[in-house]
Amino acid sequence: MTHAGAWLLAEDIRKFSISADVACALFLGSDKFRILDRRGFSKDIYSMIEDVVGYILSKINVEYIVKKIRREEKPEIPEEALREAVVNALAHRDYRSAANVQVYIFQDRIEIVNPGGLPPCMTREDLGIKSIPRNPLLFGLLHRMAVVEHIGSGIRRIRTLCNEHGIAEPEIDVSENWFTITFLRSWVRDVDGFSDWKTMSPREATAQSPKEVNEDTGEDTGEDTGEDTGEAAEKIRHLLRVLERGPLKRTDAQLAIGLKSQSHFRDRYLVPALQAGLIEMTIPDKPSSGNQRYRPTAKGLKFLRRQEKDVR
């Protein structure tokens, strides 16, 4: 029996390839400081695809849309895009590696990581256009099982599905030994909604006022920051004004709008502004680069002008 046959027929894939399983984890906040839930999946590859996708869907937000007498469920990230990413991770991973496929679910994003960078002779620019299967026999079997489509279509299909769903295309990070695809989550209110805050009642504004965050643990201290939604909207405007003068590092932008808590600034302002398309990274291919800066987009400047006009 071939390796591909064992991976597709095994009751426990680890009996044939000890690191061929998938590890999933749900974290509190946007870092790996505190794990809320952890699951491992180690059946055959087909079963793992279904189980992992099901696990992710059980941990993210789902919108219920009622159409006449039927209810339609719309996950914040399209199910088929998640499935395609999981399939790619298992079909193209390096099974010689001692590492397994890892799925990290954060408050602001989902990362799907597999061992093995791009195959030889393939570049980052080829993603979505060309493909060189690392495991051709496994890929061929999955293709005949209708689990994968044409070679080279996976990344392109994921991007198309996200665009049709109305969310940002996932970020892709490639190194010599790892391949990571990151979906940004819509866990926060769209910043375009700030224009509605001026019409909220004091009770509604108080309910949405952020709490003080412990800088070390990222946990809610239970103390109110005293910041109402009007002040929050003003900080967004202030952030855009500051960045309009020139790109800034996260720490400089945070200090410029008078915030001490890194996690509060990131979760309340930076990530929502990025997701809403009001600001952008100067090095989008390397989100964690030490040279990373942030600047307003054309949409952000338009939003700022509109907000300033409304305030006046």
Image (spheres, rainbow, N blue to C red):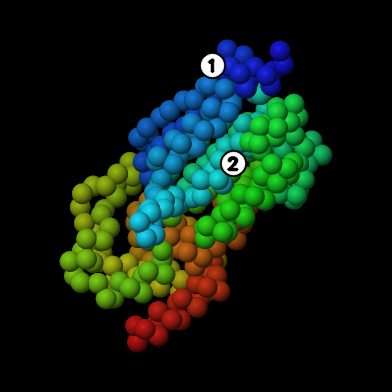
**Mark sitting on residue 188:** none
Answer above or below: position of 300 versus 111.
Answer: below
Secondary structure of residue under mark 1: loop
Q: Earlier in the sequence, mark 1 or mark 2?
A: 1
Residue 212 lies, in percent from the top left, at: 26, 53
Can residue 267 be seen by looking at this rendering?
no
Residue at 67% over, 28% down: 94
* Residue in view at x 62 percent, y 55 percent: 160
Residue position for label 1: 12
Q: Compared with residue 229, is residue 310 higher up or lower down, i.e. above or below?
A: below
86 is higher (above) or lower (below) than 125 = above
User: Badge 2: few (under 14), some or many (20 or more) residues near its Cα, within 10 Å?
Assistant: many
- Tags 1 and 2 touching, CB below 8 Å: no
Q: Amino acid at mark 2?
A: Ala
Foreground of the two, 282 or 138: 138
Label 2, on which residue? 85
Q: Nearer the viewer, residue 26 or 232?
A: 26
